[in-house]
Image: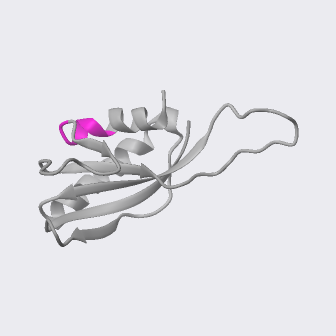
Amino acid sequence: MTTESLLNDVLKTLVSNRVYPDVAPELTARPYITYQQVGGESANFVDPTVPTKKNSRFQVNVWADTRAAAAALAIQVEDALRVVTALQTTVLSAPVATYDQATEYKGTRQDFSFWN
């Protein structure tokens, strides 16, 4: 199963299936979650071995109507991702508050590292 599939499966229960790669469709009900891969570490070996796992760094964004709702959802996201054995999650940062002026949505963004 891909990292994206695992992320979607884990996070969709928190927001009634409103989880999207990159951006959400216009007028998506809040709260919702978006995510995108923002890099990762390459596993390299001296011998000609292909790694059995790949690392990926993902930014997970939550969007809500209020700062309190966004902060609460960010905690749920972090807790949910920490316990997924298949992802071997490392939390790389605390949530960073963000605001979208055009929509007035409040949100957070947070980086995670996964080995899958």
Asked whether 75 or 52 is in front, the reply is 52
Relative to 77, residue 2 above or below: above
Q: Position of residue 9 (x, y in %)?
A: 34, 32
Q: Position of residue 49 (x, y in %)?
A: 80, 33
**12 displayed left or right of 27:** right
Q: How is the image coloured?
A: one colour
Q: Which residues are magenta?
A: 11-16
As drawn, the residue found furthest toward the right would be 47
As drawn, the residue found furthest toward the top would be 1
Relative to 60, residue 87 above or below: above
Asked whether 42 or 16 is in front, the reply is 42
Asked whether 112 or 23 is in front, the reply is 23
As drawn, the residue found furthest toward the front would be 26
Tell me which residue sits at (29%, 43%) in the image.
20
Relative to 79, residue 12 above or below: above
- Magenta highlight: main SS: helix
Query: Picture quarter containing residue 59?
Result: bottom left
- Count of numbered marks: 0
Magenta span includes 15: yes
Tell me which residue sits at (12%, 60%) in the image.
65
Q: Position of residue 1 (x, y in %)?
A: 48, 27
Tell me which residue sits at (28%, 69%) in the image.
98
Asked whether 48 or 108 is in front, the reply is 48
As drawn, the residue found furthest toward the bottom would be 101
